[in-house]
Image (cartoon, grey):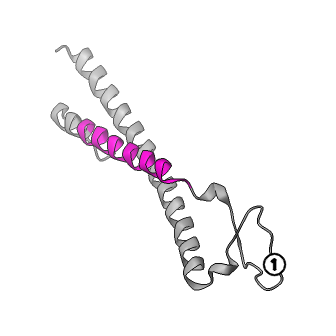
C-alpha cells in the first residue's frame, strides 16, 4: 500500500473511532439520565406511592405530591432496548476500530 493510501486509511479509521467514542458517550449519558429518573421514581413509589404525581394528574388535598414526574423522563421498555442495543453495537464497532488502529500502528486511546 502506498504511503498516501496508508495515511488516508489511518486518518479515516482515527476519525471513525473518535466519532464512535463520542456517540457512545452521548448514549451512555442518556442511559444514565434515564436510570436516575427511574431511581427517583422507584424511591418515591417505595416510600410514599400515593404522593407520586405525573403531568396532568390532579393533586388531592390529602395527597399533595412533593414532586411532579414528567412522562418524558420515562421511556418505555422498547426504547430502552433500542438504546442498550445501540450502545452494544457502537461498543463492538469502537473495539473493532481500535483493533484496526493498533494493526495500522495508530493510537486508539485518543
Q: Position of residue 66 (x, y in %)?
A: 72, 79
Please tell me whether residue 107 is drawn above or below residue 30 in the rendered image. above
Q: Bounds of the magenta span?
A: 75-97
Q: Residue at x 19, y 38 (%)?
A: 102
Name the residue tied to disc 1: 60
- Quarter residue 65 falls in: bottom right
Label 1: state its secondary structure.
loop
Q: Is residue 78 magenta?
A: yes
Nearer-the-camera pick, 90 or 22: 90
Please tell me whether residue 35 is drawn above or below residue 103 in the rendered image. below
Q: Main secondary structure of the magenta part?
A: helix
Nearer-the-camera pick, 103 or 84: 84
Q: Position of residue 46 (x, y in %)?
A: 54, 81
Please tell me whether residue 69 is drawn above or below residue 86 in the rendered image. below
Q: Position of residue 82 (x, y in %)?
A: 44, 45
Q: Residue at x 67, y 74 (%)?
A: 52
Q: Residue at x 33, y 41 (%)?
A: 89
Amino acid at each position: 500500500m502506498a504511503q498516501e493510501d496508508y495515511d488516508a486509511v489511518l486518518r479515516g479509521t482515527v476519525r471513525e473511532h473518535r466519532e464512535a467514542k463520542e456517540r457512545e458517550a452521548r448514549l451512555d449519558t442518556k442511559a444514565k439520565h434515564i436510570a436516575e429518573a427511574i431511581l427517583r421514581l422507584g424511591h418515591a413509589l417505595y416510600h410514599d406511592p400515593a404522593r407520586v404525581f405525573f403531568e396532568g394528574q390532579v393533586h388531592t388535598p390529602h395527597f399533595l405530591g412533593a414532586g411532579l414526574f414528567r412522562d418524558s423522563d420515562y421511556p418505555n421498555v422498547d426504547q430502552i432496548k433500542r438504546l442498550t442495543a445501540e450502545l452494544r453495537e457502537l461498543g463492538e464497532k469502537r473495539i473493532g476500530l481500535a483493533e484496526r488502529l493498533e494493526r495500522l500502528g495508530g493510537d486508539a486511546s485518543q
